[in-house]
Image (spheres, grey):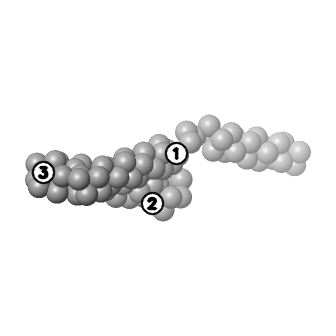
């Protein structure tokens, strides 16, 4: 009986050590990337405000800023979606 208990304990230990060796989930990368994109939107929005106040007829600048803001917003959407996918997989990645 002692051998059976020892074998069971060894199997449990092997399973626990296998779980602890799994790589960490890449949550931080997605959150940091989304935060950086949000900061980029903040800076671009400030630039857009200045352009609209002081050079509203500079259509090329407004279009460029608008495209950059939409690109940053898309980055936030993508990174936050990836973050949610990692969270919802509950370690099954």
The first of marks 3 and 1 along the sequence is: 1
Residue at the (34%, 58%) spot, across then down: 77
Q: Residue at x 38, y 58 (%)?
A: 81
- Observer-side mark, 3 or 1, equals 3
Residue for point 83% across, 42% down: 6
Q: Which residue is mark 2?
A: 84
Residue 32: percent from the left, percent from the top? 48, 45
Q: For the residues marked 3 and 2, what is the alpha-carbon distance in whole angstroms?
A: 39 Å
Identify the residue at the far bottom of this view: 88
Q: Which residue is mark 1?
A: 28
Would residue 35 be found to the left or right of residue 75 on screen? right
Q: Position of residue 49 (x, y in %)?
A: 30, 56
* Label 2: element kind: helix
Under tag 1, what secondary structure? helix
Asked whether residue 82 appears in the rendered view, the answer is no
Q: Which residue is mark 3?
A: 58
Q: Residues within 10 Å of mark 3 (few under 14, many from 20)?
A: few
Mark 3 or 2: in front is 3
Mark 3 falls on what kind of element? loop
Q: Position of residue 79 (x, y in %)?
A: 38, 52
Q: How many numbered circles are shown?
A: 3
């Amino acid at each position: 009986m002692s051998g059976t208990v020892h074998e069971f304990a060894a199997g449990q230990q092997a399973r626990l050590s296998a779980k602890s060796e799994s790589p960490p989930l890449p949550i931080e990368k997605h959150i940091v990337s989304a935060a950086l994109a949000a900061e980029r939107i903040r800076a671009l929005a400030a630039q857009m405000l200045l352009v609209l106040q002081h050079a509203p007829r500079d259509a090329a600048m407004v279009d460029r800023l608008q495209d950059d803001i939409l690109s940053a917003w898309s980055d936030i959407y993508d990174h936050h979606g990836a973050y949610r996918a990692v969270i919802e997989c509950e370690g099954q990645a």
